[in-house]
Image (cartoon, rainbow, N blue to C red):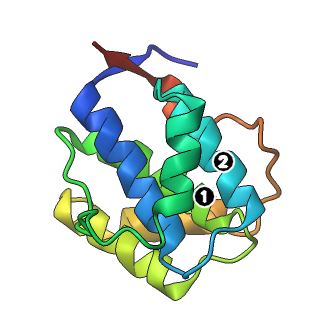
């Protein structure tokens, strides 16, 4: 499994916010996306009620920055994008708006297009269980 990567509360917040923005890109939140985002929020140390509220409000919340997150390391950005691709695929289709947003996240974090395409191909069409390991499972939040 490897060692845990420590991240700040701010980065945990950006990770969660970024994935919320991702699931809102197609204008609806599927049940598999809902389940995975709650699981990710829990892994990042957020309370269940907070996660549920955030999911319920993301489609209407005009005050959330729509900017892709900029992480402190490329390693963390890659973890985010891998989880983002899994999340985008959760409803059996990576929508165009989701892909464009993840690509802009990759670009903002200096990750090349070839890496992104390889990861997308690795994830595309793969059957997943909600309990499968995600990149977020290897993160620990420093308080």
Which quadrant of the view contains residue 33?
Answer: bottom right
Query: Within 10 angstroms of label 1, few (less than 14), some, or many (20 or more) residues?
Result: many
Q: In this rendering, is residue 47 above or below 104? A: above
Residue at x-position 66% and y-position 47%: 36
In this view of the protein, can residue 91 be seen by the observer? Answer: yes
Q: Position of residue 123 (x, y in %)?
A: 64, 60
Q: Residue furthest bottom?
A: 96
SS for dot 2: helix
Measured Cα–Cα span from mark 2 to mark 1? 7 Å
Q: Which residue is mark 1?
A: 87
Q: In this rendering, is residue 59 above or below 111? A: below
Q: In this rendering, is residue 42 above or below 35? A: above
In this view of the protein, can residue 118 be seen by the observer? Answer: no
Residue at x-position 61% and y-position 56%: 86
Q: Position of residue 54 (x, y in %)?
A: 48, 51
SS for dot 1: helix
Residue at x-position 77% and y-position 43%: 130
Q: Which residue is mark 2?
A: 36
Q: Is residue 55 left or right of residue 12?
A: right
Tag 2–tag 1 contact (CB < 8 Å) = yes
Q: Is residue 26 left or right of residue 34?
A: left
């Amino acid at each position: 499994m490897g060692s845990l990567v420590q991240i700040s509360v701010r980065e945990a917040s950006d990770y969660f916010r970024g994935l919320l923005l991702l699931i809102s890109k197609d204008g609806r939140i599927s049940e598999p996306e809902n389940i995975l985002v709650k699981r990710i929020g829990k892994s990042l140390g957020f309370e269940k009620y907070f996660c549920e509220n955030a999911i319920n409000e993301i489609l209407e919340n005009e005050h959330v920055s729509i900017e892709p997150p900029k992480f402190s390391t490329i390693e963390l950005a890659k973890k985010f994008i891998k989880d983002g691709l899994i999340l985008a695929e959760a409803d059996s289709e990576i929508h165009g708006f989701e892909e464009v947003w993840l690509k802009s996240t990759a670009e903002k974090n200096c990750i090349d297009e070839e890496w992104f395409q390889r990861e997308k191909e690795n994830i595309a069409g793969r059957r997943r269980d909600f309990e499968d390991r995600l990149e977020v499972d290897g993160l620990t939040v420093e308080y």
